[in-house]
Amino acid sequence: MSAIGVIATLRVQSGKEADFEAAFAELAAAVNADEPGNSYYRLFRTDERGTYKVLECYDNPAAVEAHRASSHFREIGARFGPWLTGAPDIERLAGV
């Protein structure tokens, strides 16, 4: 099976961007250290203030599930909630 790509769009409340970026840096470090099935996990700012894209690449569906079930994703990701303006938009992509 080919890789799975994910693009997550997150919208952060004005004034909470620095908190979000700092917490995301912690999450990205944990993903990179503890998820061998993840080959890419990086945050990008868009041109729209407070809107971010997370680009992710996983080896297979099991790696996606391992990410979602990881303690670092649940614990650090839970901190994002009060800073977001709504639920993230998630786009899944099939590698070719």
Image: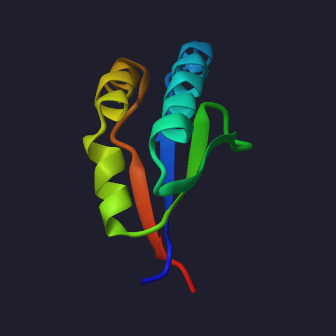
- Direction from residue 47 to residue 88 in the image, left or right: left
Residue at the (60%, 23%) spot, across then down: 21
Q: Nearer the viewer, residue 36 or 7?
A: 36
Relative to 61, does residue 8 appear above or below in the rendering?
Answer: above
Q: The N terminus appears in which quarter of the rendering?
A: bottom left
Q: Position of residue 55 (x, y in %)?
A: 59, 53
Quarter-of-image position of residue 75: top left
Relative to 84, does residue 32 appear above or below in the rendering?
Answer: below
Residue at the (59%, 25%) spot, across then down: 25
Residue at the (36%, 34%) spot, across then down: 73
- Direction from residue 94 to residue 45 in the image, left or right: right
Relative to 62, does residue 88 appear above or below in the rendering?
Answer: above
- Direction from residue 22 to residue 72 in the image, left or right: left
Q: Position of residue 43 (x, y in %)?
A: 63, 40
Q: Position of residue 85 (x, y in %)?
A: 40, 31
Q: Residue furthest left?
A: 69
Relative to 32, does residue 95 appear above or below in the rendering?
Answer: below
- Direction from residue 52 to residue 5 in the image, left or right: left
Residue at the (36%, 57%) spot, across then down: 64
Q: The C terminus appears in which quarter of the rendering?
A: bottom right
Q: Residue furthest right?
A: 47
Quarter-of-image position of residue 14: top right
Q: Nearer the viewer, residue 43 or 9?
A: 43
* Colour basis: rainbow
Number of disc labels: 0
Q: Position of residue 15 (x, y in %)?
A: 58, 13
